[in-house]
Image (cartoon, rainbow, N blue to C red):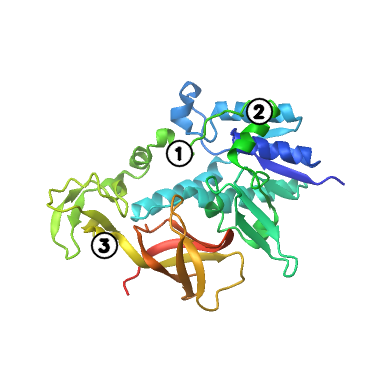
């Protein structure tokens, strides 16, 4: 019996080619798009919907499905996305953190509830256009997550929370390809998405204006407060913690003879803490909500390369266990501005050991 796979189709080239490759491999493929944002005023689609589920993106995904000869469905996931992604995103910013909504979406939506829906269709897996790879260790039966073959497009750092069950039900057909090869494949197949520009914005935030989005969503988070130095001296005032992130230098509105950087956000005082450049260079961080993929648990210190933001080159570090769900990350050299709320992902070569959420810098 031919295995059935559900493909999450965003209307972009990567997910289009993912679906095409699975069709070529002989799978029974179903294409779906998750509508995570309400459809209003379609003439202003880009501004209203961001990039993920505008009518144009849905039209492109449907056209690709038609070209490939596969069934296609548009699923209403507004309420679920609100609960699992948007509300935690807003709460995190209000608490002085810098969240990564794609991580929550992958864990709770794409490889969470969508996997359950796929099983109702007798599908064995959900596939996406992520640049990452999955293998299974023959000796242990453990599923392993690897960086995408194209290091410039690698998205494994957005997938670290996936459980063994989720990895077993995930497929990343373009993980072994580079971006140029993906576009070439799409052109060869005559897919309308072949030369579609990439979007780097958060999918549910129109025009990448996250501050405008948050102002509408949580106006109370824009209350004024003090900007203080490390000793608590007031240097100025701010118009809301959500306007700042750790490591920020510009836009502080301070008059100072030396360069000052945001070193911390303190929601208990509604204060922005600033300091010299050396105060944002951190040697040790605490990570929480830790999930391990390559190992079952951490029993002692382990050498890894740790990545603290998507654009960060993984840096040599040692991780050691704290209480359950938490680890201490000690870098060989201080790293600039690890921001609470961001992911820290642990690698050994291209293998994803696991990851967690940055809680705070730890002072030795």
Quadrant assignment, res 196: top right
Residue at image x 67%, y 60%?
165
Residue at image x 60%, y 64%?
293
Determine which residue is flagged by label 2: 187
Q: Earlier in the sequence, mark 3 or mark 1?
A: 1
Q: Secondary structure at mark 1?
A: loop
Q: Position of residue 220 (x, y in %)?
A: 29, 47
Q: Position of residue 268 (x, y in %)?
A: 27, 61
Which dot, 1 or 2, sits closer to the camera? 2
Residue at image x 71%, y 46%?
118
Tag 1–tag 2 contact (CB < 8 Å): no
Could one spot residue 33 in this view of the protein? no
Q: From the viewer's side, name the closer residue of 71 and 196.
A: 196
Determine which residue is flagged by label 3: 279
Q: From the viewer's side, name the closer residue of 88 and 3.
A: 3
Q: Secondary structure at mark 2?
A: helix
For residue 35, the mark is none
Count of residue discs: 3
Extreme residue in the right direction: 1
Extreme residue in the bottom direction: 300
Measure the alpha-carbon separation of dots 2 and 3.
49 Å
Q: Earlier in the sequence, mark 2 or mark 3?
A: 2
Measure the alpha-carbon separation of dots 3 and 1.
29 Å
Pointer 2: residues within 10 angstroms few (<14), some, or many (20+)?
some
Q: Earlier in the sequence, mark 1 or mark 2?
A: 2
Quadrant assignment, res 335: bottom left
Determine which residue is flagged by label 1: 201
User: Is residue 350 positioned above or below 186 on the image?
Assistant: below
User: Is residue 203 positioned above or below 279 on the image?
Assistant: above
Q: Is residue 257 left or right of residue 136?
A: left
């Amino acid at each position: 019996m031919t295995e059935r796979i559900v493909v999450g189709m965003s209307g972009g080239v990567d997910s289009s080619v993912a679906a095409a490759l699975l069709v070529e491999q002989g799978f029974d493929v179903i294409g779906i798009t998750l509508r995570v944002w309400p459809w209003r005023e379609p003439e202003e689609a880009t501004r209203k919907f961001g990039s993920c589920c505008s009518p144009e993106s849905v039209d492109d995904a449907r056209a690709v499905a038609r070209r490939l000869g596969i069934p296609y469905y548009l699923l209403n996931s507004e309420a679920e996305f609100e609960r699992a992604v948007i509300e935690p995103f807003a709460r995190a910013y209000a608490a002085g953190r810098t969240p990564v909504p794609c991580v929550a979406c992958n864990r709770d939506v794409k490889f969470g509830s969508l996997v359950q829906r796929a099983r109702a269709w007798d599908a064995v897996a959900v596939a996406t256009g992520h640049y990452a790879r999955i293998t299974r260790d023959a000796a242990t039966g453990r599923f392993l997550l690897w960086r995408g073959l194209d290091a410039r497009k690698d998205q494994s750092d957005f997938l670290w929370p996936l459980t063994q069950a989720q990895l077993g039900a995930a497929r990343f057909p373009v993980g072994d390809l580079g971006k140029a090869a993906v576009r070439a494949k799409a052109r060869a197949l005559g897919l309308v998405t072949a030369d579609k520009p990439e979007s780097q914005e958060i999918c549910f935030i129109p025009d990448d204006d996250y501050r405008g989005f948050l102002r509408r969503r949580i106006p109370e988070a824009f209350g004024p407060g003090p900007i203080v130095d490390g000793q608590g001296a007031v240097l100025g005032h701010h118009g809301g913690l959500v306007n700042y992130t750790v490591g920020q230098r510009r836009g502080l509105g301070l008059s100072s003879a030396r360069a000052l950087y945001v070193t911390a956000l303190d929601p208990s005082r509604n204060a922005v803490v600033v300091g010299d450049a050396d105060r944002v260079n951190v040697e040790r961080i605490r990570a929480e909500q830790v999930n391990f993929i390559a190992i079952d648990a951490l029993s002692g210190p382990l050498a890894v390369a740790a990545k603290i933001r998507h654009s960060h080159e993984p840096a040599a570090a040692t991780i050691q266990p704290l209480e359950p769900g938490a680890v201490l990350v000690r870098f060989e050299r201080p790293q600039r501005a690890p921001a609470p709320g961001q992911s820290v992902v642990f690698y050994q070569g291209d293998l994803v050991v696991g990851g967690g959420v940055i809680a705070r810098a730890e002072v030795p």
